[in-house]
Image: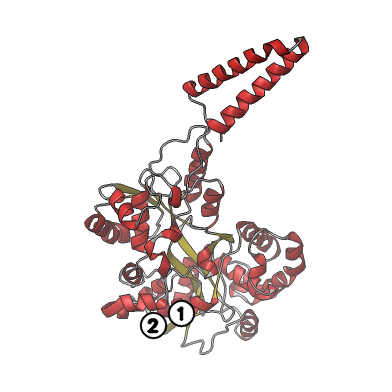
Amino acid sequence: MIAHPDKEVVNQVKGRLRKWHSSCCTLHSAEGGCMIRRISACLFIALLLSGCAHPRPTPVSSGPGLAGADWSRVEAAARGTEVAWLMVDSSGLVNRYVDEFVAPEMQKRYGIAIRRLPMRDVAAVVQDLVNQRRSARPPSGRVDLLWIRGAEFQQAREAGALYGPWSRDLPNARLVEWPQPSIAQDAGRPVDGYGAPWGQQALALLYDTARVPSPPTTMAALEAWLRDHAGRFTYPQPPSPEGRAFLWQAFYELTGGYQQWQGEFDEAAYAAKAGPVWGYLQRLAPLLWHEGREYPVSALQLEELYARGEVDFSLTYNPAQVWRRVQAGEVPRTTAIYFLEHGTLAHTHYLAIPFNAPHKAAAMVVANWLESAEVQADKARIDIWGDLPVIGAQAVQSASGSHASVIPAAATTASTILRTRRLPQPPPALAERLDRDWERLVK
């Protein structure tokens, strides 16, 4: 966007143009004078466009005060500052983690104060940030760190509303499993250093081993199982996260894999390959709970059906949370967790820095510490959070030490499986198309 130019710059440009115009006056006729004035006006506008606009956000490698800086200089710049952190957490678990664990440690280790700000509507916050970026005079920012992922992350990134690239330059970035598509890409687009991976969630199926000794591990096997156990399975309706995830799993498996669907939406490919997916889900519908006449509206409702014994399976993005419910006696103690044979949907949540963040160095220090092996291992503990790590399993195990017993088997298994079988989420255009077609063809 073009900024309003400073008056001093405008006057300098006008002065130069007047001198140039005067020197040319002896050369023109009446018609020529008109041409000179046109050229003068064009040059004036060109000079304003090239010299008076606000610069775009610069990457860490060339950012102010950070050019060529080693990490000790970044830490020094961060000391004594505050990080205003926008985040959304409906459960309260992550809020407590930040307030009771992260904030005291950052103050003690780096002299950085954490001020957590509630974010009730991620889309509205991102749109406001985008509007700030597009403003002729972008305002100074009041937020240093965003907890973000998915379509909103990509919207902010594409609008130039995020600072970067920076996250691949963090010292602890070497621990992150960047080769994995579910980490290096978000919503079908490369992260490209504009977000620091903080944690992961993976779609898992839970089942009651007392009723299901051998659970189906493919979509075809699920259909065959339901023909003998009609009504004992269902899934939440999209666009609930777990409902979408089940739909995406089926779409990937029945169309030959996820790779072809990353990037721009391909209408011709979709038209050629989506038919068998809708045929499968239509065949499945009368075999589901309540014969597919209704679907749970959320994973929570599905879990309640499971806890009451109305269905034999449930879906979750948080295996550790299920483990806590098992220990509390809220679901059958014979509950186990497994993952589908062709891979499991995983999504990574990231920490991003707004383009106009006032304390970028401090935000980077916070993100780097949260990627350390010790912190990632602690975060995986069910008595702290139970969030899956984004770093290698060996680093997590080495850092776990005496706390290994409180990292649940489900989380350990999930981390192991995710290293080879995690599936990235589809781009927003494909996800929205699948939502609409499910509503039209299946519900």
Measure how far apart labels 1 and 2 are at the Cα level: 24 Å
Dot label at residue 424? none
Instruction: Please indicate whether residue 131 sits to the left or right of residue 393 in the image.
Output: right
Percent coordinates x, y for residue 383 in the rendering: 30, 71
Residue nearer the viewer, 287 or 133 = 133
The disc, 1 or 2, on the residue closer to the chain's N-terminal end is: 2
Q: Residue at x 49, y 87 (%)?
A: 211
Q: In what element is the residue under mark 1?
A: helix
Residue 143: which quarter of the image? top left
Q: Which residue is mark 2?
A: 333
Answer whether residue 211 is visible to the viewer in this image: yes
Give the number of the mark in front: 1 or 2.
1
How busy is the neighbourhood of tag 2: few (under 14 within 10 Å), some, or many (20 plus)? some
Amino acid type, callout 1: Thr
The residue lying furthest to the bottom in this view is 213
**Amino acid type, label 2:** Arg
Q: Name the residue tied to disc 1.
A: 416
- Residue 400 position, x and y percent, is 31, 76
- Label 2 element class: loop
- Residue beneath the point at 52% across and 35% down: 135
x 68%, y 16%: residue: 37
Model colouring: secondary structure
Q: Nearer the viewer, residue 373 or 36?
A: 36
Front in this rendered view, residue 374 or 11: 11
Q: Quadrant of the N terminus?
A: top right
